[in-house]
Amino acid sequence: MATDPKTKTVFQLVGVVVFMGALAWASVPFYDWFCRVTGFGGTTNVADGTSSEILDRTIKIRFDGSKARGFGWEFKPAQTEMTIRIGEEGLAFYEAYNPTDRVIAGQASYNVYPYEAGAFFDKIECFCFTEQVLQPGERVMMPVSFYVDPEIVDDRDAKHTNHITLSYTFYEIDLPQEERADLDQGNTDESSVN
C-alpha cells in the first residue's frame, strides 16, 4: 500500500517539530551542566568543604552587585575587594535592603570574570543557592564563603589570573507559596477586624 506524499510530508514535518522541541527542552539543562563542568561563561563550582591545600600565592577577589531593572531592593557588596591565598577560604557579605512597603522575593544570578577562572572558583555556601524574601523595611547581610582551587596555577588559560571579580545580579521572583499564604492570612485577619 503506497503512502500519500502529502501524508508523508506532514509526518516528516511533525517529526522535525517534535525533534526540535525535544532539543530545545534538553538544551537548558545540558548548557547548565556544561557551564558547571567547564566554568564556561564564568559559572562557578559548588564545594562540599574547604580546600585541602593552601598556596603561598595570593589572588585578589573583587565584588560587584547589581539588580534587574525595576527590582525594588537596594543591593551592594559590603566590601569591594579582598586578597586571599589560593586555596584559603574567603568570607564576603552582600547587603540587601527592601525600602518598599511590600514583601519582595529575589534570586541572585552570578558569574565570575575572567571566565576561565570560573572552573576554579568554588563556593562553599552562598545566598545565591536559595531564594531570598525580604519584608518591608528589612535589611540583611548575606554571606558567601568560597575559595580559589589551587589547580588554577596549573591551568594553561587561568594560571596568570591575578584577580577575579565575583558578580551578582538580583532579580524579582514570585513569592514562595508559604509567604503568599501568610500574606493572604494577614489580609483575611485585617478584613475581619474592619
Image (cartoon, rainbow, N blue to C red):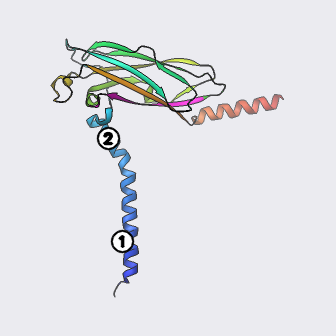
6 vs 136: above or below: below
Question: From the viewer's perspective, is residue 129 above or below residue 63?
Answer: below
User: From mark 2 to mark 1, how far is it between C-alphas?
Assistant: 31 Å
Q: Mark 2 or 1, which is nearer the eye?
A: 1
Q: Is residue 188 left or right of residue 151?
A: right
Image point (62%, 28%), residue name: 103
Question: Residue type at mark 1?
Answer: Gln
Vertical placement of residue 128 versus 61, above or below: below
Contact between marks 2 and 1 (CB within 8 A): the answer is: no
Q: Residue at x 29, y 36 (%)?
A: 40
Q: Is residue 11 left or right of residue 97?
A: left
Q: Residue furthest right?
A: 194
- Look at label 2 and name its amino acid: Trp
Residue 144: x %, y % from top left? 40, 20
Quadrant of the drawing holding the N terminus? bottom left
**Magenta-colored span:** 104-115
Q: Which mark is residue 33?
A: 2
